[in-house]
Image: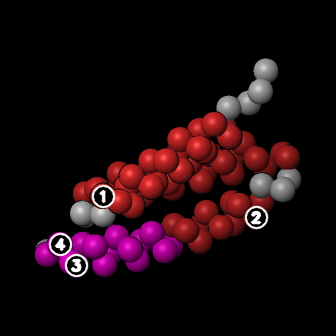
Amino acid sequence: IELDELQRDFLEEVRFMLESVEESFLKLDEPANRKDELTNIFRVVHSVKGAAGAVGFEDLGAFAHIVEDLLQILRVEPD
């Protein structure tokens, strides 16, 4: 398999995963859902971060890393 084919497959998978993220963002309005939905979003971003570098999308991986750090802040519950 060539790199361009892996990149196309990766982008197709990311599009699918972003649909899940969109659904989770829409559910954040409900306080009871926040923890689970932020965890779902974090998992997707974490997966994108890891896979992006593997297929040569280093900038996307770096961006996902920043988003992951921001999501981690949101996931910490205040004392």
Specify whether residue 43 is in view.
no
User: Mark 4–mark 3 contact, CB under 8 Å?
Assistant: yes
* Residue positioned 85% across, 46% down in the render: 31
User: Mark 2–mark 3 contact, CB under 8 Å?
Assistant: no
Q: What type of secondary structure mainly makes up the magenta span?
A: helix
* Residue positioned 51% across, 56% down in the render: 44
Give the labeled residue for mark 4.
3
Distance in Å between CA atoms under marks 4 and 3: 5 Å
Element type at mark 4: helix
Residue 63 falls in which quadrant of the image? bottom left
Residue 33: horizontal and vertical position, in percent? 78, 49
Residue 58 - label: 1
Amino acid beneath label 2:
Leu
Distance in Å between CA atoms under marks 2 and 3: 32 Å
Element type at mark 2: helix
Residue toward you, 75 or 37: 75
- Looking at the image, tell me whether mark 4 or mark 1 is earlier in sequence order: 4
Magenta segment: 2-16
- Looking at the image, tell me whether mark 4 or mark 2 is earlier in sequence order: 4
Element type at mark 1: helix
Residue 5 - label: 3
20 left or right, relative to 28: left
Q: Quadrant of the N terminus?
A: bottom left
